[in-house]
Image (cartoon, grey):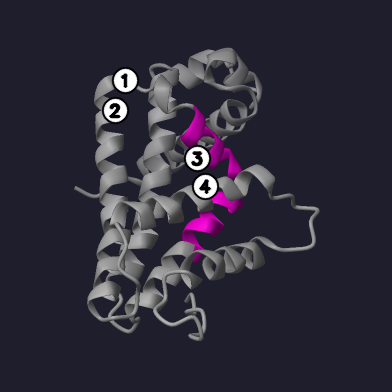
Amino acid sequence: MARTVREELKARKQAYVQEEILNSAERLFAERGIRAVSIDDIANNLGYTKSVVYYYFKNKNQLLWEIFERIHAAWDGQMEELYTRTDLAPADKLAAMTRQYGINVLQNRAWTTIYFRDEGELTREQQKLLYEWKQHFDNILRNVYLEGVEKGVFKSMPPYVVVGGIIGASNFLRVWFRDTGKMTIEEVSEANVALLLGGLLVGRSRKAPRSG
Protein backbone atom coordinates (compact mmCIF):
# COMPACT_ATOMS: atom_id res chain seq x y z
CA MET A 1 0.00 0.00 0.00
CA ALA A 2 1.37 3.41 -0.98
CA ARG A 3 2.43 5.73 1.81
CA THR A 4 0.50 8.92 2.45
CA VAL A 5 2.11 12.32 1.92
CA ARG A 6 2.41 12.73 5.70
CA GLU A 7 4.12 9.36 6.06
CA GLU A 8 6.48 10.18 3.22
CA LEU A 9 7.44 13.51 4.81
CA LYS A 10 7.98 11.81 8.17
CA ALA A 11 10.21 9.17 6.59
CA ARG A 12 12.28 11.85 4.85
CA LYS A 13 12.67 13.81 8.08
CA GLN A 14 13.77 10.69 9.95
CA ALA A 15 16.29 9.81 7.25
CA TYR A 16 17.66 13.36 7.40
CA VAL A 17 18.04 13.31 11.19
CA GLN A 18 19.68 9.87 11.05
CA GLU A 19 22.16 11.15 8.50
CA GLU A 20 22.92 14.19 10.64
CA ILE A 21 23.56 12.03 13.69
CA LEU A 22 25.87 9.69 11.77
CA ASN A 23 27.80 12.63 10.32
CA SER A 24 28.17 14.15 13.78
CA ALA A 25 29.41 10.84 15.18
CA GLU A 26 31.89 10.47 12.31
CA ARG A 27 33.42 13.88 12.94
CA LEU A 28 33.69 13.43 16.70
CA PHE A 29 34.92 9.82 16.58
CA ALA A 30 37.61 10.85 14.08
CA GLU A 31 38.70 13.87 16.13
CA ARG A 32 38.65 12.36 19.63
CA GLY A 33 38.30 8.59 19.36
CA ILE A 34 35.13 6.72 20.19
CA ARG A 35 35.92 6.26 23.88
CA ALA A 36 36.26 10.00 24.42
CA VAL A 37 32.89 10.76 22.82
CA SER A 38 29.54 10.41 24.59
CA ILE A 39 26.03 10.29 23.18
CA ASP A 40 25.56 13.70 24.79
CA ASP A 41 28.51 15.02 22.76
CA ILE A 42 27.00 13.74 19.52
CA ALA A 43 23.62 15.27 20.36
CA ASN A 44 25.02 18.60 21.58
CA ASN A 45 27.04 18.93 18.40
CA LEU A 46 23.72 19.11 16.54
CA GLY A 47 21.68 21.00 19.11
CA TYR A 48 19.65 17.87 19.91
CA THR A 49 18.95 16.12 23.19
CA LYS A 50 20.46 12.68 23.69
CA SER A 51 16.96 11.18 23.60
CA VAL A 52 16.83 12.08 19.90
CA VAL A 53 20.03 10.11 19.27
CA TYR A 54 18.75 7.16 21.29
CA TYR A 55 15.56 7.17 19.25
CA TYR A 56 17.58 6.20 16.18
CA PHE A 57 20.63 4.42 17.63
CA LYS A 58 20.71 2.26 20.75
CA ASN A 59 24.38 2.97 21.59
CA LYS A 60 27.76 4.12 20.26
CA ASN A 61 28.56 0.67 18.93
CA GLN A 62 25.62 0.81 16.56
CA LEU A 63 26.77 4.22 15.36
CA LEU A 64 30.31 2.96 14.84
CA TRP A 65 29.15 -0.15 13.01
CA GLU A 66 26.92 1.84 10.67
CA ILE A 67 29.91 4.03 9.84
CA PHE A 68 31.91 0.90 8.95
CA GLU A 69 29.02 -0.34 6.84
CA ARG A 70 28.86 2.98 5.00
CA ILE A 71 32.56 2.83 4.24
CA HIS A 72 32.36 -0.64 2.77
CA ALA A 73 29.17 0.03 0.83
CA ALA A 74 30.85 3.02 -0.85
CA TRP A 75 34.35 1.66 -1.37
CA ASP A 76 33.45 -1.91 -2.26
CA GLY A 77 30.84 -0.68 -4.70
CA GLN A 78 33.48 1.32 -6.55
CA MET A 79 35.93 -1.57 -6.61
CA GLU A 80 33.29 -4.02 -7.84
CA GLU A 81 32.33 -1.63 -10.61
CA LEU A 82 35.94 -1.36 -11.78
CA TYR A 83 36.51 -5.10 -11.36
CA THR A 84 33.63 -6.00 -13.66
CA ARG A 85 34.62 -3.60 -16.43
CA THR A 86 35.46 -5.55 -19.58
CA ASP A 87 36.99 -2.59 -21.44
CA LEU A 88 40.05 -2.41 -19.17
CA ALA A 89 43.13 -4.62 -19.53
CA PRO A 90 44.52 -6.03 -16.23
CA ALA A 91 47.22 -3.34 -15.88
CA ASP A 92 44.74 -0.53 -16.50
CA LYS A 93 42.17 -2.11 -14.22
CA LEU A 94 44.61 -2.54 -11.33
CA ALA A 95 45.80 1.04 -11.88
CA ALA A 96 42.22 2.36 -11.79
CA MET A 97 41.48 0.42 -8.61
CA THR A 98 44.68 1.58 -6.92
CA ARG A 99 44.00 5.17 -7.91
CA GLN A 100 40.42 5.09 -6.65
CA TYR A 101 41.45 3.50 -3.37
CA GLY A 102 44.07 6.19 -2.80
CA ILE A 103 41.53 8.90 -3.53
CA ASN A 104 39.07 7.31 -1.09
CA VAL A 105 41.69 7.21 1.65
CA LEU A 106 42.50 10.90 1.19
CA GLN A 107 39.09 12.37 0.37
CA ASN A 108 37.35 11.20 3.52
CA ARG A 109 39.98 11.15 6.23
CA ALA A 110 37.36 10.94 8.98
CA TRP A 111 36.30 7.55 7.60
CA THR A 112 39.90 6.49 7.12
CA THR A 113 40.89 7.47 10.67
CA ILE A 114 37.97 5.61 12.20
CA TYR A 115 38.48 2.56 10.00
CA PHE A 116 42.11 2.03 10.93
CA ARG A 117 41.98 3.13 14.55
CA ASP A 118 38.65 1.93 15.96
CA GLU A 119 38.29 -1.58 14.56
CA GLY A 120 39.12 -2.93 18.04
CA GLU A 121 36.00 -1.23 19.43
CA LEU A 122 33.74 -3.50 17.38
CA THR A 123 32.21 -6.70 18.73
CA ARG A 124 33.74 -10.06 17.83
CA GLU A 125 30.97 -10.78 15.37
CA GLN A 126 31.41 -7.40 13.74
CA GLN A 127 35.17 -7.88 13.52
CA LYS A 128 34.62 -11.28 11.93
CA LEU A 129 32.36 -9.77 9.28
CA LEU A 130 34.82 -6.93 8.75
CA TYR A 131 37.58 -9.48 8.18
CA GLU A 132 35.44 -11.18 5.52
CA TRP A 133 34.88 -7.82 3.81
CA LYS A 134 38.61 -7.16 3.80
CA GLN A 135 39.31 -10.61 2.36
CA HIS A 136 36.83 -9.98 -0.42
CA PHE A 137 38.48 -6.64 -1.15
CA ASP A 138 41.94 -8.25 -1.19
CA ASN A 139 40.75 -11.05 -3.46
CA ILE A 140 39.48 -8.60 -6.06
CA LEU A 141 42.92 -6.99 -6.32
CA ARG A 142 44.56 -10.42 -6.23
CA ASN A 143 42.44 -11.72 -9.11
CA VAL A 144 43.25 -8.74 -11.31
CA TYR A 145 46.94 -9.08 -10.54
CA LEU A 146 46.98 -12.82 -11.29
CA GLU A 147 45.14 -12.23 -14.56
CA GLY A 148 47.90 -9.80 -15.50
CA VAL A 149 50.59 -12.35 -14.58
CA GLU A 150 48.86 -14.98 -16.70
CA LYS A 151 48.79 -12.60 -19.67
CA GLY A 152 52.46 -11.73 -19.26
CA VAL A 153 51.80 -8.15 -18.21
CA PHE A 154 52.91 -8.36 -14.58
CA LYS A 155 55.96 -9.96 -13.02
CA SER A 156 55.19 -13.05 -11.00
CA MET A 157 55.44 -12.39 -7.27
CA PRO A 158 53.62 -13.71 -4.20
CA PRO A 159 50.12 -12.19 -4.55
CA TYR A 160 49.89 -11.35 -0.86
CA VAL A 161 53.03 -9.18 -1.20
CA VAL A 162 51.56 -7.29 -4.15
CA VAL A 163 48.11 -6.80 -2.62
CA GLY A 164 49.51 -5.95 0.81
CA GLY A 165 51.92 -3.49 -0.75
CA ILE A 166 49.22 -1.68 -2.71
CA ILE A 167 46.82 -1.44 0.22
CA GLY A 168 49.49 -0.64 2.80
CA ALA A 169 51.15 2.11 0.76
CA SER A 170 47.79 3.62 -0.18
CA ASN A 171 46.64 3.61 3.44
CA PHE A 172 49.83 5.40 4.49
CA LEU A 173 49.07 8.35 2.18
CA ARG A 174 46.81 9.77 4.86
CA VAL A 175 49.72 10.04 7.31
CA TRP A 176 51.76 12.57 5.35
CA PHE A 177 49.34 14.21 2.90
CA ARG A 178 48.49 17.86 3.57
CA ASP A 179 45.79 19.88 1.85
CA THR A 180 48.17 22.83 1.79
CA GLY A 181 50.78 20.90 -0.17
CA LYS A 182 51.67 21.41 -3.83
CA MET A 183 49.90 18.27 -5.08
CA THR A 184 46.17 17.58 -5.20
CA ILE A 185 44.61 14.37 -3.93
CA GLU A 186 44.26 13.17 -7.51
CA GLU A 187 47.88 13.96 -8.35
CA VAL A 188 49.15 12.15 -5.26
CA SER A 189 47.05 9.13 -6.10
CA GLU A 190 48.35 9.10 -9.68
CA ALA A 191 51.93 9.23 -8.39
CA ASN A 192 51.11 6.38 -6.03
CA VAL A 193 49.86 4.30 -8.97
CA ALA A 194 53.03 4.96 -10.96
CA LEU A 195 55.22 4.05 -8.00
CA LEU A 196 53.40 0.85 -7.03
CA LEU A 197 52.52 -0.56 -10.44
CA GLY A 198 55.65 0.55 -12.25
CA GLY A 199 57.65 -2.16 -10.53
CA LEU A 200 55.12 -4.84 -11.45
CA LEU A 201 55.13 -4.32 -15.19
CA VAL A 202 57.15 -6.67 -17.34
CA GLY A 203 59.81 -4.62 -19.15
CA ARG A 204 61.05 -1.41 -17.52
CA SER A 205 60.51 0.56 -20.72
CA ARG A 206 56.77 0.08 -20.61
CA LYS A 207 54.63 3.12 -19.82
CA ALA A 208 52.82 3.16 -16.50
CA PRO A 209 49.21 2.00 -16.96
CA ARG A 210 46.44 4.53 -17.23
CA SER A 211 44.16 4.61 -14.23
CA GLY A 212 40.69 5.24 -15.41
Q: Earlier in the sequence, mark 1 or mark 3?
A: 3
Residue tagged by mark 3? 16
**Quadrant hosting residue 191:** bottom right
Q: Earlier in the sequence, mark 3 or mark 4?
A: 3
Dots 2, 1 in contact, CB < 8 A: yes
Q: Amino acid at mark 3?
A: Tyr
Eyeballing the image, is 125 above or below 174? Answer: above
Give the residue displayed 65% in from the left and 60% down from the top: 185
Residue tagged by mark 2? 126
Q: 51 or 170: which is nearer to us?
A: 170
Boundaries of the magenta span? 99-117
What SS does tag 3 mark? helix
Q: Earlier in the sequence, mark 2 or mark 3?
A: 3
Q: Which of pointers 4 and 1 indicates the residue nearer the eye?
A: 4
Circle number at residue 171: 4
Q: Is residue 5 left or right of residue 38?
A: left
